[in-house]
Image: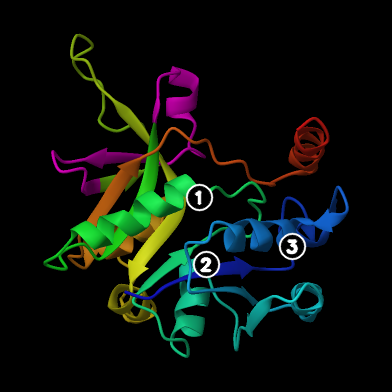
Amino acid sequence: MKVIAMIPARLQASRFPKKLLRDLCGKTVITRTYEATVNTGLFDAVYVVTDSEEIKAEIEANKGQVIMSLKEHECGSDRIAEAADSVPGDIIINVQGDEPFTRKEPLADLIEVFKKDIHGEIAVASLVHTMEDWHEIVNPNNVKVVLDNNHCVMYFSRAPIPHPRDKEVEVTYYKHIGIYAFRRYALLNFPKMKMCQNEATEKLEGIRFLEHGMKMKMVETPFKVIGIDVPEDLEKAKQMIQHG
């Protein structure tokens, strides 16, 4: 089973333009993410997938591998699906370009899902962790996911699900962490699958797999994802590196 990592890397970001090329204690954000992914030792190959000549030059200057996007894409899954079409690999993991503290353990857990899935029933795997604070649960920026008894996805939503109609029932709320691992066919089929109304209204690409009958497995992880979304996040990341 050949496992590759792809790191979608857009130059422009609405909340923090050119964040991937910002300096993070001597290296850019995208270079640190690339190196952290390579250093896990889990992958047969790691590629940065970008529409930017600047990012391409940065990664190649650090001896990394780059695939240039041929056209504009609406989401990261579309971007890496185009790139994966030209690269051999059985399992493709989408690592976010703005996560320079990418760790080995959760990525290894995702790969293990497919090793254990001997009948090939799981098309996509991803990560969750639990939430207990109600303000965090109702925040629409935190994507909630309802799981069945086998930890497979029933639905994603920006709303608090399941809805706590009966306050006496003890409920576990799961937050989705957007690191996806795909079987090759699932990723390559993604851009060909029609966006249906639930994905369109929630603006959550994971729903597309569900609406087209694909099985998605979630792995609960204790590791918090640390991304660079706004300038304040970059300053926090610098402090983390400086203070070990």
Task: Check disc 1 and report the residue beneath it.
Answer: 104
SS at mark 3?
A: helix
Q: Quadrant of the C terminus?
A: top right
Circle nearer the N terminus (3, 1) = 3
Give left or right: position of 230 versus 8.
right
In the image, residue 137 lies in the stretch drawn in magenta: yes
Question: Vertical placement of 223 versus 198: above or below?
Answer: above
| Picture layout, residue 221 above or below residue 43 | above
Mark 1 secondary-structure assignment = helix
* Label 3, residues with CA under 10 Å away: few <14, some 14-19, many ≥20: many
The residue at 16%/41% (across/down) is 148
CA gap between label 3 and label 1 equals: 17 Å
Which kind of residue does numbered mark 2 sit on? Answer: Gly
Given the current orientation, which residue lies at the most extreme front position? 41
Callout 2 crowding tier (Cα within 10 Å): few <14, some 14–19, many ≥20: some
| Nearer to me, 140 or 130 | 130
